[in-house]
Amino acid sequence: MKDLPGGEAFSTLSVSSSLSPLQFYVPAEILIPPVLARVSVRWERPVDMLLRTVLVLSQCALAILIPELDLVISLVGSVSSSFLALIFPPILQILTFHTEASSGSSASSRETYIAIEKIIERNGLKSTEAFSSFMVQ
Protein backbone atom coordinates (compact mmCIF):
# COMPACT_ATOMS: atom_id res chain seq x y z
CA MET A 1 0.00 0.00 0.00
CA LYS A 2 3.05 2.28 0.17
CA ASP A 3 2.97 2.97 -3.56
CA LEU A 4 -0.64 4.23 -3.44
CA PRO A 5 -1.27 7.94 -2.96
CA GLY A 6 -2.67 9.11 0.35
CA GLY A 7 -4.97 11.84 1.40
CA GLU A 8 -8.63 12.65 1.52
CA ALA A 9 -9.12 12.66 -2.26
CA PHE A 10 -7.81 9.12 -2.58
CA SER A 11 -9.97 7.92 0.31
CA THR A 12 -13.06 9.46 -1.28
CA LEU A 13 -12.21 7.92 -4.64
CA SER A 14 -11.63 4.47 -3.17
CA VAL A 15 -14.91 4.55 -1.22
CA SER A 16 -16.89 5.75 -4.22
CA SER A 17 -15.39 3.06 -6.45
CA SER A 18 -16.19 0.37 -3.88
CA LEU A 19 -19.79 1.52 -3.86
CA SER A 20 -20.08 1.18 -7.60
CA PRO A 21 -23.51 -0.08 -8.67
CA LEU A 22 -21.80 -2.01 -11.45
CA GLN A 23 -20.68 -4.75 -9.07
CA PHE A 24 -24.29 -5.42 -8.09
CA TYR A 25 -25.56 -5.63 -11.65
CA VAL A 26 -25.83 -9.44 -11.77
CA PRO A 27 -27.20 -9.96 -8.23
CA ALA A 28 -29.66 -7.11 -8.78
CA GLU A 29 -30.88 -8.67 -12.03
CA ILE A 30 -31.51 -11.90 -10.13
CA LEU A 31 -33.04 -10.48 -6.93
CA ILE A 32 -35.01 -7.43 -8.02
CA PRO A 33 -37.38 -8.65 -10.81
CA PRO A 34 -39.31 -11.09 -8.58
CA VAL A 35 -39.82 -8.30 -6.04
CA LEU A 36 -40.90 -5.81 -8.71
CA ALA A 37 -43.42 -8.31 -10.04
CA ARG A 38 -45.30 -8.00 -6.73
CA VAL A 39 -45.32 -4.19 -6.74
CA SER A 40 -47.64 -1.88 -8.67
CA VAL A 41 -46.19 0.02 -11.63
CA ARG A 42 -46.22 3.27 -9.69
CA TRP A 43 -43.86 1.87 -7.03
CA GLU A 44 -41.48 -0.05 -9.31
CA ARG A 45 -38.79 2.65 -9.56
CA PRO A 46 -38.74 3.58 -5.83
CA VAL A 47 -38.65 -0.09 -4.80
CA ASP A 48 -35.89 -0.78 -7.34
CA MET A 49 -33.80 2.09 -5.98
CA LEU A 50 -34.49 1.03 -2.39
CA LEU A 51 -33.39 -2.56 -3.03
CA ARG A 52 -30.21 -1.42 -4.79
CA THR A 53 -29.46 0.96 -1.92
CA VAL A 54 -29.97 -1.83 0.61
CA LEU A 55 -27.58 -4.06 -1.33
CA VAL A 56 -24.87 -1.40 -1.37
CA LEU A 57 -25.35 -0.46 2.28
CA SER A 58 -25.27 -4.11 3.33
CA GLN A 59 -21.97 -4.50 1.50
CA CYS A 60 -20.57 -1.47 3.33
CA ALA A 61 -21.84 -2.77 6.68
CA LEU A 62 -20.24 -6.16 6.09
CA ALA A 63 -16.95 -4.54 5.09
CA ILE A 64 -16.98 -2.47 8.28
CA LEU A 65 -18.23 -5.15 10.69
CA ILE A 66 -16.24 -8.20 9.59
CA PRO A 67 -12.70 -8.15 10.93
CA GLU A 68 -10.11 -9.62 8.59
CA LEU A 69 -12.45 -9.36 5.62
CA ASP A 70 -9.63 -10.35 3.29
CA LEU A 71 -9.44 -13.76 4.96
CA VAL A 72 -13.20 -14.25 4.70
CA ILE A 73 -13.09 -13.37 1.01
CA SER A 74 -10.23 -15.83 0.52
CA LEU A 75 -12.21 -18.54 2.30
CA VAL A 76 -15.32 -17.95 0.21
CA GLY A 77 -13.22 -17.92 -2.96
CA SER A 78 -11.43 -21.15 -2.14
CA VAL A 79 -14.62 -22.97 -1.19
CA SER A 80 -16.54 -21.79 -4.23
CA SER A 81 -13.68 -22.49 -6.63
CA SER A 82 -13.27 -25.96 -5.16
CA PHE A 83 -16.98 -26.55 -5.64
CA LEU A 84 -16.86 -25.31 -9.22
CA ALA A 85 -13.75 -27.31 -10.09
CA LEU A 86 -14.26 -30.57 -8.20
CA ILE A 87 -17.88 -31.06 -7.16
CA PHE A 88 -20.07 -29.32 -9.73
CA PRO A 89 -18.76 -31.09 -12.90
CA PRO A 90 -19.41 -34.65 -11.64
CA ILE A 91 -22.86 -33.65 -10.39
CA LEU A 92 -23.60 -32.07 -13.75
CA GLN A 93 -22.43 -35.21 -15.57
CA ILE A 94 -24.53 -37.46 -13.35
CA LEU A 95 -27.59 -35.30 -14.00
CA THR A 96 -26.89 -35.21 -17.72
CA PHE A 97 -26.20 -38.91 -18.24
CA HIS A 98 -28.33 -40.41 -15.47
CA THR A 99 -30.12 -42.70 -17.94
CA GLU A 100 -26.79 -44.23 -18.97
CA ALA A 101 -25.74 -45.04 -15.40
CA SER A 102 -23.66 -48.17 -15.17
CA SER A 103 -23.45 -50.68 -12.38
CA GLY A 104 -20.03 -49.25 -11.49
CA SER A 105 -21.48 -45.91 -10.48
CA SER A 106 -24.18 -47.52 -8.37
CA ALA A 107 -21.61 -49.78 -6.71
CA SER A 108 -19.45 -46.76 -5.99
CA SER A 109 -22.42 -44.94 -4.50
CA ARG A 110 -23.27 -47.95 -2.37
CA GLU A 111 -19.67 -48.26 -1.12
CA THR A 112 -19.59 -44.56 -0.29
CA TYR A 113 -22.82 -44.89 1.67
CA ILE A 114 -21.49 -47.90 3.60
CA ALA A 115 -18.21 -46.10 4.41
CA ILE A 116 -20.06 -43.03 5.69
CA GLU A 117 -22.38 -45.24 7.72
CA LYS A 118 -19.41 -47.00 9.35
CA ILE A 119 -17.72 -43.70 10.16
CA ILE A 120 -20.86 -42.46 11.86
CA GLU A 121 -21.27 -45.75 13.70
CA ARG A 122 -17.67 -45.71 15.00
CA ASN A 123 -17.83 -42.10 16.07
CA GLY A 124 -21.17 -42.72 17.73
CA LEU A 125 -19.62 -45.52 19.79
CA LYS A 126 -16.64 -43.40 20.73
CA SER A 127 -18.79 -40.52 21.84
CA THR A 128 -21.03 -42.77 23.98
CA GLU A 129 -17.94 -44.46 25.48
CA ALA A 130 -16.39 -41.10 26.27
CA PHE A 131 -19.63 -39.87 27.73
CA SER A 132 -20.12 -42.97 29.91
CA SER A 133 -16.50 -42.90 31.14
CA PHE A 134 -16.95 -39.24 31.96
CA MET A 135 -20.09 -40.06 33.95
CA VAL A 136 -18.34 -42.84 35.94
CA GLN A 137 -15.57 -40.54 37.14
Image (tube, grey):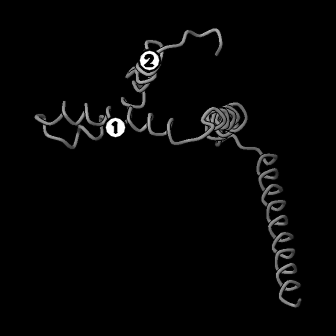
Image coordinates of residue 80 in percent, x first then y, are: 64, 35
74 lies above or below 130: above
Image coordinates of residue 29 in percent, x first then y, are: 36, 29
Q: At label 1, which amino acid type do we have?
A: Val
**Residue depicted at 87% across the width and 74% down the height:** 126
- The answer to whether residue 93 of the structure is visible from this angle is no
Q: Is residue 100 left or right of residue 23?
A: right
Earlier-in-chain disc, 1 versus 2: 2
Q: Is residue 2 left or right of residue 66?
A: right
Q: At label 2, which amino acid type do we have?
A: Ser
Q: Is residue 126 left or right of residue 30?
A: right
Please name the residue that numbered disc 1 is placed on: 54
Tell me the distance, in whole angstroms, between the alpha carbons under discs 1 and 2. Answer: 17 Å
* Other-residue count near label 1 (Cα within 10 Å), few / some / many at <14 / 14–19 / ≥20: few
Image coordinates of residue 130 in percent, x first then y, are: 86, 78
* Other-residue count near label 2 (Cα within 10 Å), few / some / many at <14 / 14–19 / ≥20: few
42 lies above or below 128: above
Local SS, label 1: helix
Q: Nearer the viewer, mark 1 or mark 2?
A: 2
In the foreground, 68 or 97: 68
37 lies above or below 25: below
Extreme-front residue of the structure? 7
Q: Is residue 119 left or right of residue 34?
A: right
Q: Which mark is residue 108?
A: none
Please name the residue that numbered disc 2 is placed on: 17
56 lies above or below 114: above
